Image (cartoon, grey):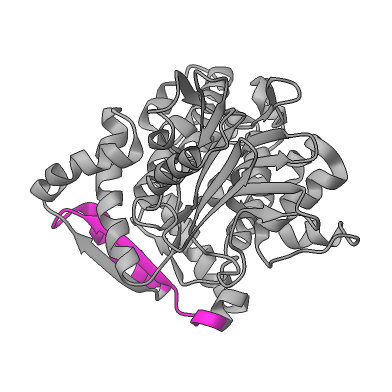
């Protein structure tokens, strides 16, 4: 995960303003310790702090089209970038970065290309030909993004609140699945899946279809040019992620670079059930398993840092983020830059205990829809920011667009406890 900051239309193109943008961008350096970039066009600034996962050698940002009239700063991973490149035969790409397709898609399709992106992302695109811009956030909000307005009429967009809160009169969460267009002067929702209406679906449950959709979601997230691993608590969701990763790792580009031995990671208090269960699954899968212990006092000591990084006072989120924050530091110290995790399964399948009390399938389905729509405020926020605090990227296959569409089309009666 990288860090992006954009300041647009601030009516100030002085060196002092440029230095201020640089200063604020440095507040996001933990998200992207590998490189920093700043592009200025008049009174518009696009800054980037890079965590290099794909094409570490040449994929520095901001990114451009051929004549540099379109500029993009982006945080994310575009899993179908090779397919999208093949649909743009007349375009020349400057880098091997998966995000390089964004500027070229805009040239070809205008503002309506966002739904073509399969991945997680938050980006700002500036068209210097008319000084217009668009900003967009991924479907579920796996990638954080905030928007603010300055007293001078400027618009600020940042990966974290700490990049803009001091300079904005008002700021808020950039809504997931939305696009902001300067030409239209506001937001519009680009993500409109069938389940969003909360109408009760009726597709019969087919375990083979569901399995194939999830395997596809995991496999596409094995796209990496750096060492990676899986988070493995021993629960059903993380165990499924780990087992599919272990099975398919051998045939990937990552395996050719880093070997076929999968590394798994677990954290817990001494004697905790997660450690025991994670160890059992790791032994079964044959992973190189790393077990990290922390004490209650370690957790208490970390709370202030955790709140600073995840930017919420929600008690449940802080409690869950604290061990993840501590574990991420250990993982990064081992040279790993990306992990695959199991967030999202409980929301999609009604895995929380209170779902057992659902009176009927209609209310069960509506609650799963509500939980998915709120993920960006809780589990996505925790998973992204607790790992990004140490320059580590977390990928979440359960929140794959295609997988969600498959899982949320199932008749909810099949998900209920009978």
- Foreground pick, 67 / 195: 67
Q: Residue at x 12, y 45 (%)?
A: 301
Q: Please check the rendered image and state whether residue 392 is part of the magenta-colored stretch, yes or no.
A: no
Q: Residue at x 70, y 40 (%)?
A: 126
Residue closest to the far right: 90
Residue 123, relative to residue 331: is it above or below?
above
- In the visual, does 310 lie left or right of 358? left
Q: Residue at x 41, y 41 (%)?
A: 24
Residue 405, percent across and down? 68, 38
- Foreground pick, 327 / 344: 327
Counting every numbered tag in the picture gives 0
- In the visual, does 91 lie left or right of 149? right
Q: Please check the rendered image and state whether residue 284 is part of the magenta-colored stretch, yes or no.
A: yes
- In the visual, does 243 lie left or right of 361? left
**Quarter of image, res 380:** top left
Residue 4, relative to residue 185: is it above or below?
below
Residue 282, percent across and down? 36, 68
Q: Is residue 334 visible?
A: yes
- Foreground pick, 35 / 231: 35
Residue 34, relative to residue 39: is it above or below?
below
Residue 169, percent across and down? 44, 18
**Quarter of image, res 87:** bottom right
Residue 237, relative to residue 43: is it above or below?
below
Q: Residue at x 60, y 45 (%)?
A: 121
Residue closest to the far left: 297
Residue 44, percent across and down? 61, 37
Q: Which residues are magenta?
A: 257-285
- Foreground pick, 136 / 271: 136
**Quarter of image, res 318:** top left
Q: Is residue 277 visible?
A: no
């Amino acid at each position: 995960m990288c860090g992006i900051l954009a300041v647009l239309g601030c009516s100030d193109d002085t060196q002092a303003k440029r230095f201020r943008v640089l200063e604020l961008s440095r507040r996001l350096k933990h998200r992207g310790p590998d490189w920093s970039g700043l592009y200025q066009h008049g009174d518009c600034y696009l800054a980037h702090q890079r965590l290099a996962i794909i094409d570490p050698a040449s994929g520095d940002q901001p990114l451009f089209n051929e004549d540099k009239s379109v500029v993009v700063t982006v945080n994310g991973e575009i899993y179908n970038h090779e397919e999208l490149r093949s649909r743009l035969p007349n375009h020349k790409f400057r880098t091997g970065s998966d995000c390089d397709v964004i500027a070229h898609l805009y040239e070809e399709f205008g503002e309506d290309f966002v739904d073509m992106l399969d991945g997680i992302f938050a980006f700002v695109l500036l068209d210097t030909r008319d000084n217009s811009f668009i900003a967009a956030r991924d479907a579920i909000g796996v990638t954080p993004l905030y928007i603010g307005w300055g007293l001078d009429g400027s618009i600020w967009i940042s990966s974290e609140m700490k990049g803009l809160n001091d300079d904005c009169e008002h700021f808020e969460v950039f809504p997931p699945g939305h696009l902001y267009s300067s030409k239209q002067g506001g937001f519009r929702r680009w993500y409109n899946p069938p389940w969003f209406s909360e109408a009760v679906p009726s597709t019969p449950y087919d375990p083979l279809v569901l399995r194939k959709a999830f395997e596809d979601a995991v496999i596409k997230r094995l796209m990496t040019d750096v060492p990676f691993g899986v988070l493995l608590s021993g629960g059903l969701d993380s165990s499924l992620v780990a087992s599919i990763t272990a099975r398919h790792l051998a045939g990937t580009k990552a395996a050719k670079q880093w070997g076929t031995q999968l590394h798994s990671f677990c954290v817990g208090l001494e004697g905790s059930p997660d450690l025991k269960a994670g160890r059992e699954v790791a032994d079964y899968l044959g992973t190189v398993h790393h077990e990290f212990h922390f004490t209650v006092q370690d957790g208490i000591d970390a709370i202030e840092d955790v709140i600073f990084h995840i930017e919420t006072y929600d008690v449940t989120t802080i409690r869950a983020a604290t061990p993840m924050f501590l574990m991420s530091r250990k993982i990064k110290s081992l040279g790993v830059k990306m992990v695959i995790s199991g967030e999202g399964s409980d929301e999609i399948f009604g895995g929380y205990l209170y779902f057992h009390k659902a009176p009927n399938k209609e209310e069960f389905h509506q609650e799963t829809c509500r939980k998915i729509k709120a993920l960006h405020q809780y589990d996505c926020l925790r998973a992204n920011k607790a790992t990004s605090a140490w320059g580590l990227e977390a990928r979440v296959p359960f929140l794959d667009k295609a997988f969600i569409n498959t899982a949320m089309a199932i008749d909810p009666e099949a998900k209920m406890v009978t």
